[in-house]
Every structure is written in structure tokens, then in C-alpha cells.
Image: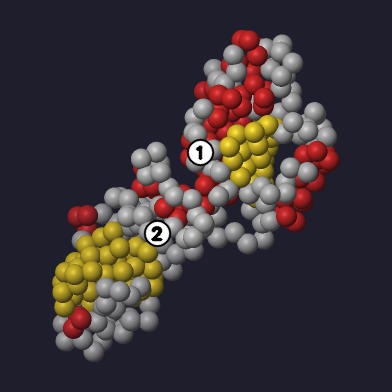
Amino acid sequence: LRSSRIRDSQAETEDQTAMATNQQMDSEPSPAPEAASPPPGAAAVDEKLYSRQLYVMGHEAQRRMMASRAVLVGLSGLGAEVAKNIVLAGIAGVTLVDPCPACGYDLGGNFYLGEGDVGSARGRAEACAGRLAELNEYVKVDVASGVTSLADEGALLGLVAGASVVVVTVPLPTALLTRLDEKCRSSGVCFIYSLSTGVFGQVFCDFGEAFTVTDKDGENPATSQVENILPSNPAVVKVLEDQGRHGLETGDSVTFSRVRGLDGLLRADEKYEVKVTGPHTFELVGVDASGCSEPATQGYITQVKTP
């Protein structure tokens, strides 16, 4: 029951953790592109192990993931799910922080704890570390042995140095959370605080002063087929209505391919800004096609996602 309740909060926290470790991650369309040669000193990507996520993230984003290190505070049900997913994703390393002993309640949410862990002298982080490490041989999973209490501000702040992201998944005093966030921000480290409390949850993210979103919705780029492009100023594009709406917004950029007509004005290697005028029409900002001898009657449109 507890696992089902925390599912939504888990999914959102996992997405935010992946964003934090890959701040400029590019989405790649299927099929996955051929791997470019890694820069000197960069780790090689195991394409068999990470094949599915390479279709989504690409090789460069995967290398950035493999060079990132997370500090995870709290191994409740939510924390265990986050730990499992970032280990499977191939992060360089994760430091687990939770000296609290396991109780029977934990068994309903943390599937890396067993009955033998209840009442033992080991904290939840230490009890989970071995099983998590077995998930991915490339990921270093360790335990912050110097933290004996989650109320130890000095010990927690000392873990920020060298991390890429600090993720807190258990309740902590507001003053301590503020100090952690301030320490992370001053150190250039991303900070995520998330809680799951039954049917409700919350997520707070601080990725610093400068954070670049390269894909605002995670969807594949919109594509359409040209019905016609009028020789006007600016050029007006109409897409085939039987293929649905073009799915663009004013300010988006698009490219064209296999355009027939318009005197070859539209080049396949250029991006064009869009001003939407209807669900099936849009203008090309700054493109004067009034001098063309004929309209375009064929072609394909692809949205270009820009930061």
C-alpha cells in the first residue's frame, strides 16, 4: 500500500535527479545515434548495458551522468526508489546517508530491507548499500559513516563538497534544509528536497543561478507535412489538416526538407522562427517570399528544440 502511495512522488523525484546530473541533456530521437569518440579521459559507455536510455539521452548525456556523484539523504521508501534508479542509470557514485535503524514500517516501502534488518545496529543506509551496489558494477555505492544523526548539521554540510547533486528524501528541520540549500548553491551543487506523505508529496529543486532547459516537455519534436507555402511577406505555411495540428508555438524553430516550389528559397540546413496563426497555419518570421514565382506544394516540417 505504501509503495503505491509514493509512486507519483518517486517518479517526479527521479526525473528531477536525472535533470540535475545532466543539466544540458539532449533528447535523441530513435534510433540511437552512433557514438562519437569520447573526449580524452572520458569513460567509455557500455552500449549493451545502457542501450535503452541511450535512445533517450544520447552518448554525451550518458557520459555526463557517468561523471556525476550524488549524495542521497534518507533511505525511506522514496529514497530507496531514487537510489535504485540512479544506480541503474549509471551515475558515477552515490553516497547514502541514513544512520537511522530500520523498523517494521520501513519494510512496506523500502524493498532493499529485510526482516533481519529490523532492530539491528546498522542504519538504513548501511543495510541497503550492498544490495544497491549489486545493481550496477560501474557505480560506486558508499555510506557516509561519519554521520551518526540526521540532525548533525556539520556532518551533512561536509558531504556537499565534490557532489553534483544532494537529494533529501526524509523530513528535516527547515533551518537545516535552508543551510544545506545555501551550501549547495554556493558550491555549485544542485539541491533537491522531496517528501512522500501518503497520497500527497512535494518536490523542491534548486539548480543554481544558471540552469539550461534544453527540452521543456520531453516530447518528440513535432513534425508535419506541407500542404502549401504561400509566396507572401512573411511566407505563410499551411500543413495537411488530415494529419492533425502542427503542434507548434510562437517562437518555436523549424527546419524544412524536400520542399518543392518557392524557387528553392527554403534551405534544409537553416532554422526558421515560427509565428502561429492557427492550428494548421503559421508564418515564417523574417522570410519574405513575395518575390517567388510559385508557392510550395510539398515538403516536410520538423520542430527544432532549442534551450
Query: Local crowd at mark 2 within 10 Å, few (<14), some, or many (≥20)?
Result: few
Horizontal side, residue 187 vs residue 15: left or right: right
Identify the residue position indicated by label 1 in the image: 138
Residue 136 at x, y = what percent? 49, 33
Q: Tell me which residue sits at (78%, 43%) in the image.
A: 157
**269, 300: nearer the viewer:** 269
The amino acid beneath tag 1 is: Tyr
Q: CA distance from mark 2 to mark 1?
A: 20 Å
The answer to whether residue 130 shows anywhere in this view is: yes
Q: Tell me which residue sits at (27%, 73%) in the image.
A: 268
Residue 17 at x, y = what percent? 57, 43
Q: Tell me which residue sits at (37%, 44%) in the image.
A: 47
Element under disc 1: loop
The answer to whether residue 78 shows anywhere in this view is: no
The amino acid beneath tag 2 is: Ser
- Which circle marks residue 37 in the picture? 2
Residue 206 at x, y = what percent? 66, 51
Residue 218 at x, y = what percent? 43, 50
Viewport quadrant of the N terminus: top right
Element under disc 2: loop
Query: Local crowd at mark 1 within 10 Å, few (<14), some, or many (≥20)?
Result: some
Q: Count up the numbered dots.
A: 2
Q: In which image quadrant can residue 124 be found?
A: top right
Q: Tell me which residue sits at (55%, 50%) in the image.
A: 67
| Residue 212, above or below 49 | below
- Callout 2 touching callout 1 (CB < 8 Å): no
| Residue 197, above or below 300 | above
Among the two numbered marks 2 and 1 on one chain, the one whose residue lies closer to the N terminus: 2
Q: In which image quadrant can residue 202 be found?
A: top right
| Residue 290, above or below 167 | below
